[in-house]
Image: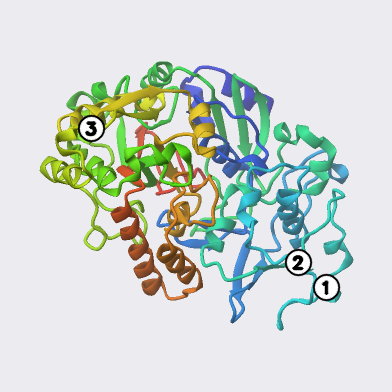
Amino acid sequence: MLALLLLLGACHSTTSSEKKVFYYNESDGIATLDPAFAKNKAIIWAVHQLYSTLVETDDQLRIVPGVARSWEVSADRRVWTFRLRRDILFHDDPAFPGGKGRRMTAADIVYSFNRILDPATASSGAWIFHDRIDTATEPPPAGSPSPAQIPPAATDQPGGFPPSPAFQAPDDSTFVLRLSRPFHPILGLLSMAYCSVVPHEVVEKYGKDFRSHPCGTGPFRFSSWEEGQDLIFLKNERYFEKDSTGRRLPYLDAVKISFKEEKATEFLLFRQGQLDFINEIDPSFKDEVLSKRGVLKKEWQGKIELSVYPQLNTEYLGVLIDTGNVLVKNSPLKIRQVRQAINYGFDRRKMMLYLRNSLGLPAESGFVPAGLPSFDSTLVHGYHYDPEKARQLLREAGYADGKGLPQMKLLTIPVYADFASFIAHQLEDVGIRIQIEVVQKSLLLEETAQSRALFFRGSWIADYPDAENYLSVFYSKNPAPPNYTRFSDPVFDRLYEQALLENNDSSRYRLYRQMDQRIVDASPVVPLWYDEVVHLINPRVHGLTPNALNLLELRRVQK
């Protein structure tokens, strides 16, 4: 291990071929390695290397086994029973007897899920079970385990907080989840990093310092972390997965993460071969690397690889439309035709060409992005650039040629200021005047959560691969977040609740598209573009497969 750490700390040289180390940079830093707080990409990427979940999503967004080898659901779709693998071991840690990682059991999943719900944990992921699990103490439905059948080891919750009856472990290799009502995307939720399996011994030994003493069952194990400098994971030699030839995963020997804050420095290190890939292309160097059509310029071809893949992320402008809010009562944005005029009044395709080098798809359908199986731009009709239509809608709203229409303030963050300026400039041509106010992201989030922002820039990145995640943003019974616009429509709510009960994919997708079209017509949002995963990859790296969730998957990467 000492030899490997010396290697990791050194510059790349001919000896680096002896150990296969994957290098990447995390400019935003990593606040914690505790999966209970895996709320952003930086944390999720690191946690994904260290921990495992019941189920996972593959690169086609299909649900596949994780620590669960199989599962079945009851006829009423409220009781999910997972059969677990019996060959999964936690990483070694001093918290275990003799320092040797023990076998993972169903009781560990019960503990991990209860820990998310425990108020003392204050997990940012507690919402995933809110109003979804059955917390009743009465006997569960017929055919599911009763409390009397559950061994004491599974009900005596380590950590001192009361266990939820929704999580049960009838035996070491069986985990049962009880829902309060059917919820089709539940498997997607269970694949999230929040649902990683953690051992109670390690959590209890380190307490709050568990953030920097992670212990899971994932393909890599924690080695060292010099915060602000670098973070190192080593190959888990006892990882349970193998490839189709029987070779144990992962192929890499180690992962080293640096924390250079400047994107220019990151790009320089990548050019020098000191990083194996870059996620996203920063505006500061995108024109150096890419043409306006989104392909590598000739001087870069053969030196780096460009990977572009649809991402489950919709960039948009949101409009607060709660007429009970005093801010809305005095705003022209409460008028549907004004919101529709904004949607018609600027050219998304030109914006993508000049400001994004054609990376991303103009959002000319609904709020649900391309990349999801329910997406169909021929069935959900959004907005395209039509300035005459925008002017017509303004006349219908009583603001012919923009006369009498007050200037409207748009809140955005610095990185999106250019897009706001482009939109404002084009809207001015149809009579809509926009004042741009650039604020920090934390302030924007606070203003929108408190319903104090009338017109604001937003983005919605999928938590799990189902259109329900996007449509929940407009369900009237949801607070802000996620319903930042305070949209309320009884017909939409009825369709949403109907979709939750629908087991047939085709029927559910049809309901999703009906809801999406209602959002388009009501225009509480102005969709801008559907994002794409953009990676610059060193040619020496093979097997770095993209996915629509932009999850960093290193198990099958080779160098």
Looking at the image, tell me whether mark 2 or mark 3 is earlier in sequence order: 2
Q: Is residue 242 above or below residue 311?
A: below
525 or 238: which is nearer to us?
525
Q: Residue at x 43, y 20 (%)?
A: 266
Label 1: few (<14), some or many (≥20) within 10 Å?
some
Would you name the residue on which mark 3 appears? 404
- Pointers 3 and 1 in contact (CB under 8 A)? no
Q: Is residue 21 visible?
A: no
Mark 3 residue type: Gly
- Pointers 1 and 2 in contact (CB under 8 A)? yes
Mark 2 residue type: Gln
Question: In the image, which disc is placed on residue 228?
Answer: none
For the residues carrying marks 3 and 1, which lies nearer the camera in this image?
Answer: 3
Mark 1 residue type: Pro
Would you name the residue on which mark 1 appears? 147
Would you name the residue on which mark 2 appears? 168
Q: Give the percent coordinates (x, y) of residue 195.
A: 64, 52
